[in-house]
Amino acid sequence: MIWLTQSEVCDRAKLSESTIERWIKDGYLVSGIHYGGTGRLRRFDPEMIDIAVRFQCDPEAHQQAIDAKRRAIFGKKRA
């Protein structure tokens, strides 16, 4: 699996770093890997970025897409 840095996410999604930070803070976007104690060195799954961008105006559809992605990865719905 390929993981993206926050700057790569900004380029891919054509969003500012402040928007990405706000999405993380609000729980709309979750990083897959954290390095270091500050959490500043994060890595993101490209498919999760695409889901967040595609469904940014529809929270219910966003959650359904995230649940489907998790089921595909883990084989069950998030608890």
Image (cartoon, rainbow, N blue to C red):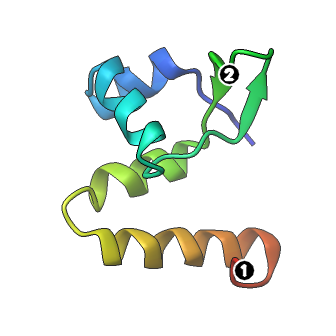
1 lies left or right of 10: right
The x and y percentages for residue 7 are 46, 15
Name the residue: 48% across, 46% down: 29
Pointer 1 residue:
79
32 lies left or right of 75: left
Q: Quadrant of residue 54?
A: bottom left
Q: Which is more toward the observer, 13 or 42? A: 42
Pointer 2 residue:
39
Q: Quadrant of residue 75?
A: bottom right
75 lies left or right of 60: right
Q: Secondary structure at mark 1?
A: loop
Name the residue: 26% across, 56% down: 56
Q: Is residue 19 above or below residue 74?
A: above
- Callout 1 amino acid: Ala
Check the picture and name the quadrant holding the N terminus. Answer: top right
Mark 2, other Cα within 10 Å: few <14 / some 14–19 / many ≥20: few
- Callout 2 amino acid: Gly
- What residue occupies the far left of the structure in this picture? 57
